[in-house]
Amino acid sequence: MATPRGIIALLLVIGFLGTAGCGRAAIHGKPAQTISKAKTAAKPNPAAIGPRSVVARIDASSDRIVAEGKFHIAPGAPSDAEIRREIAAARKAGIVLPSGDSVQSFENAPSNSSAAVQAQTPEAPWNPRSKPIADWIIPTLQWASEHGWTGTVTSGYRTYFEQAQLNAAGAFSARAGRSNHETTVYPGGAVDVTSPSQLITVLQAYPGPVKLIGGVLGPIDPEHFSATGD
């Protein structure tokens, strides 16, 4: 029969061996090294990710326009095919088109008229927006202003590029290359005005050699005035 001291010694030995088993193992009587479990990141399963989306990239300036919410295609804007037909028709008519594809190339393009642009920007109460106006129209509007017309000019001479912008915006306007606003040599040239009915009435008494006619296009473009009214 074991003595109390023997029992206590046996318990101590068993306890020591149990402690050695936590993280260590005795192999062939030798303590094994501690096994460290390194944490490794789980690798993603390609099958669970699915196909990668492809995003088309455009130039930085276009990215900025889209981000600012300025990107807009107006209802009725011409398609690429329509634009190609317009370009072909303009070239057939002898209109010189810009060779580049930038805004600057349009702005620096020569006038559609074979003659130089004959326009000025009169400083007058009836031209508060400082619109360039065909030379032959200016005296007529000045006379009308002195004889009861109280309206103002909202548009005068336009470049091909400016006319094309109106087309793209979906506003009612002649196709670029075909508008009287794009030339200044009589009988070409045109203006858009406020108080058009009043101007028509006042101009009935105009004594000048050339006439400025409005109202021909009716409700679709009542503010338009030119030598022929169209």
Image (cartoon, rainbow, N blue to C red):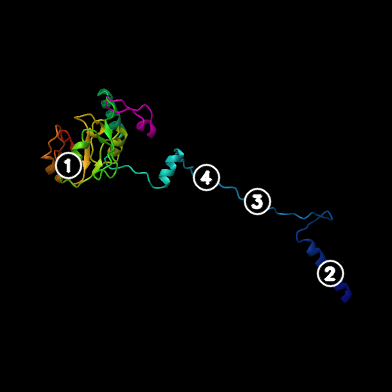
Mark 1 vs mark 4, CA separation in Å: 79 Å
Mark 2 vs mark 1, CA separation in Å: 122 Å
Quick check: 129 above or below 117?
below
In this orientation, which residue lies closer to the viewer: 82 or 201? 201
Residue 144's label in the rendered image is 1
Label 2 vs 1, first from the N-terminus: 2
In this orientation, which residue lies closer to the viewer: 176 or 142? 142
| Residue wearing tag 3 | 40
Label 4: which secondary element:
helix
Label 3: which secondary element:
loop
Tell me whether the residue at label 2 lies in contact with that at label 4, contact meaning CB atoms closer than 8 angstroms.
no
Residue 48's label in the rendered image is none
Label 3 vs 4, first from the N-terminus: 3
Q: Tell me the kind of residue under disc 4.
A: Ala
Q: Tell me the kind of residue under disc 2.
A: Leu
Q: Position of residue 50 (x, y in %)?
A: 49, 45
| Residue wearing tag 2 | 12
Mark 1 vs mark 3, CA separation in Å: 88 Å
Magenta stretch bounds:
95-114
